[in-house]
């Protein structure tokens, strides 16, 4: 079981699975308790008056500054960034070199640390760029390669870095020049980083990160652009990694390349892993544990790589969800067994604006082949506002391919696609949301470990206006976005009849319920066109009836629906027009009555 990622009530809670309800948000406060307890301990730690404790605790705080950012990349976006020690080293060296003045005149320590932060941010994006194109495994290798390069440069560029001899770290002014003074500074920055990443986690950006990890095609269909999103995150994670490096150099007072080992990189990565992906409390605890581990078990220090390897194996095999999953009690509560999906069509009125100018989606001569197979072959198709257009045909006749071309997953080899006056660009699925095109999938694409509500909120990502930076700091526009997206999502869930399950983890739902979750998510775009790929598959006859009424009501609100379906009864009952495909070509087109009477269709597809 994985932790609820976005889930987190105000995310601080390591994965309790539910966004707090509107209003007082008691669960939000409850989620804060472990953090406040940790902070209280951290604040009184200096009472021990033990400089050794100060060193370890400062180190943990510094590591967490880096890991909090890395957590967004590894834990939320699911990118295997294992070489983050490189950014840590770059920050440390930049700050030290600037402060020592080996290249430029010596800079004040604040500027030196800022320089390290900027260097981290820039390098974070550079190291991150391959992730936008490469598969996770190759990305992992590039981050490792980068780490090796940084260490080699630090060793070789003696005039600047001091080579193997090293360079002095920036020394901080009073009151940060004592062990506990530095500790409080690092603690303060760590608290700030916790707060900022928690803000991101519970924003549309956090949800989008998890969506790109768990359901990438659905994320794109919701208008989420993965490259833009990841660049923001790489920038932030790089900045905090660089800052952490600068602080580390101050703590060490002197740095050499062998302070930045592969073991340290592993520590960063594994702290997120044992913490549990999509959580903040988990990786924070992971950081504290991993920083203390070599100290409490000093003889183990020489074995640390070995110990880490064992840890990873144990975690992956025994608790794949990490610490956060162990702490997640809420998702073990039973759900009512005899629940029914009861759409509330009245809610559609508020959700969809009926007075939108009618537009038409048109395919002209669209063709696409895979190797020798002509999946669709010269297809003309029109979907008009307020109409349900049924698309039927035997398996393999090109229905899903048609939806994939319309939603931008495939580029047609011939033909044109237009929505109103606009020509739809090929192969840009995340552009479709802007054209008001929403879709569901033949196999539901859901984030299992997020709540139903959060899954639907992913569909409303493009509603938000606040920037990533505003979300980091939880500024007013960000708070307004959240309120709007959540209110719209609750409305959409109400409309499809799943309001009561809003706060349940999506992987606990039945298959039929997931189909309605997908419709709710698609409605978040207030679409002009809704493409449904076999929404009735796996539904009971009663559910199919309600689905039919729902689709009908959606189209009556001015939405053009393209309905791919095998249930002929449903098609004939609710469609205004029907197109029958066979081998990628239109076999017949007409009203339901005409299709039912069409000889070839009856013999080829419908049966006697
Ligand atoms: P339907 O949804 O009507 O059952 P599809 O559109 O999924 O049919 O498939 C149409 C044809 O295109 C089938 O012959 C299928 O095997 C082929 N096809 C679809 N997608 C791909 C793909 N990505 N690669 C190769 N062949 C594909
Ligand atoms: Mg299909």
Image (cartoon, helix red, strand yellow):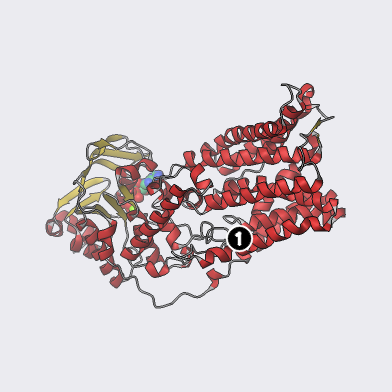
For the N terminus, the quadrant is bottom right
Is residue 396 visible in this depiction of the protein? no
Comparing 153 with 98, the one in front is 98
Residue 580 in the image: state x and y as whole percent: 21, 52
Comparing 66 with 372, the one in front is 66
Q: Quadrant of residue 242?
A: top right
Q: Is residue 519 left or right of residue 349?
A: right
For the C terminus, the quadrant is bottom left
Comparing 33 with 566, the one in front is 33
Is residue 466 visible in this depiction of the protein? yes
Residue of label 1: 321
Residue 222 in the image: state x and y as whole percent: 39, 48
- The crowding category of the residue bearing disc 1, from other C-alpha atoms within 10 Å (few below 14, some 14 to 19, many at least 20), is many
Residue lying at 45% horizontally and 49% vertically, measured from the top left: 476
Residue 123 in the image: state x and y as whole percent: 62, 33
Q: Quadrant of residue 495?
A: bottom left
Examine the rendered structure and indicate whether residue 402 appears above or below residue 128.
below
Examine the rendered structure and indicate whether residue 187 appears above or below residue 553.
above
Q: Secondary structure at mark 1?
A: loop
Q: Is residue 512 left or right of residue 558?
A: right
Extreme residue toward the front, this view: 174
State how many labels appear. Answer: 1
Residue 383 in the image: state x and y as whole percent: 21, 48
């Amino acid at each position: 079981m994985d932790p609820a990622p976005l889930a987190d009530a105000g995310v601080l809670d390591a994965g309790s699975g539910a966004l707090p309800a509107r209003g007082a948000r008691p669960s939000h406060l409850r989620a804060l308790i472990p953090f406040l307890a940790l902070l209280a301990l951290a604040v009184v730690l200096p009472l021990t008056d033990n400089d050794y404790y100060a060193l370890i605790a400062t180190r943990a705080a510094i590591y967490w500054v880096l890991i909090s950012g890395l957590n967004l990349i590894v834990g939320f976006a699911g990118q295997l960034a294992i070489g983050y020690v490189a950014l840590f080293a770059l920050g440390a060296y930049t700050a030290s070199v600037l402060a020592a003045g080996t290249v430029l005149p010596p800079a004040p320590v604040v500027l030196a640390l800022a320089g390290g932060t900027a260097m981290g941010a820039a390098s974070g994006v550079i190291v991150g760029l391959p992730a936008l194109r490469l598969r996770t495994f190759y990305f992992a290798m590039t981050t490792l390669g980068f780490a090796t390069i940084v260490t080699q440069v630090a060793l070789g560029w003696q005039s600047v870095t001091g080579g193997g001899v090293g360079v002095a770290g920036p020394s901080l002014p009073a009151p940060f020049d004592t062990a506990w003074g530095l500790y409080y500074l690092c603690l303060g920055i760590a608290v700030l980083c916790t707060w900022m990443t928690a803000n991101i986690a519970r924003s549309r950006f956090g949800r989008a990160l998890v969506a790109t990890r768990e359901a990438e095609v659905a994320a794109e269909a919701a208008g989420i652009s993965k490259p833009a999103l990841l660049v923001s995150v790489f920038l932030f994670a790089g900045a905090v990694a660089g800052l952490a490096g600068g602080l580390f150099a101050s703590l060490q007072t002197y740095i050499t390349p062998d302070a930045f080992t592969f073991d340290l990189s592993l520590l960063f990565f594994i702290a997120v892993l044992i913490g549990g992906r999509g959580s903040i409390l988990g990786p924070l605890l992971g950081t504290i544990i991993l920083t203390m581990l070599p100290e409490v078990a000093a003889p183990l220090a020489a074995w640390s790589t070995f110990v880490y390897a064992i840890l990873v194996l144990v975690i992956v095999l025994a608790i794949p969800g990490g610490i956060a999953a162990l702490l997640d009690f809420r998702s073990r509560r039973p759900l009512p067994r005899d629940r029914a999906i009861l759409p509330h069509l009245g809610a559609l009125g508020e959700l969809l604006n009926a007075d939108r100018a009618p537009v038409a989606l048109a395919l002209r001569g669209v063709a696409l082949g895979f190797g020798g197979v002509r999946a669709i072959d010269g297809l003309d198709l029109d979907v008009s506002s307020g109409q349900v257009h049924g698309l039927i045909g035997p398996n393999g006749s090109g229905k899903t391919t048609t939806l994939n071309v319309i939603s931008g997953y495939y580029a047609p080899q011939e033909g044109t696609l237009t929505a109103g006056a606009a020509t739809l660009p090929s192969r840009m699925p995340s552009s479709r949301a802007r054209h008001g095109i929403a879709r569901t999938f033949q196999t539901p694409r859901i984030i299992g470990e997020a709540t139903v509500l959060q899954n639907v909120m992913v569909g409303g990502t493009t509603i938000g206006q606040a920037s990533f930076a505003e979300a980091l700091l939880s500024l007013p526009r960000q708070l307004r976005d959240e309120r709007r997206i959540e209110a719209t999502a609750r409305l959409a869930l109400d409309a499809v009849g799943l309001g009561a399950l809003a706060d349940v983890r999506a992987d606990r739902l039945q298959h039929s319920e997931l189909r309605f979750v997908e419709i709710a998510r698609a409605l978040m775009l207030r679409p002009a066109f809704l493409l449904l790929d076999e929404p009735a598959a796996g539904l009971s006859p009663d559910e199919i009836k309600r689905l039919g009424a729902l689709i009908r009501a959606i189209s009556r609100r001015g939405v053009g629906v393209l309905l791919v379906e095998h249930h002929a009864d449903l098609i004939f009952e609710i469609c205004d027009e029907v197109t029958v495909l066979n081998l990628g070509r239109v076999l017949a087109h007409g009203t339901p009555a005409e299709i039912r009477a069409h000889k070839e269709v009856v013999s080829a597809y419908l049966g006697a």
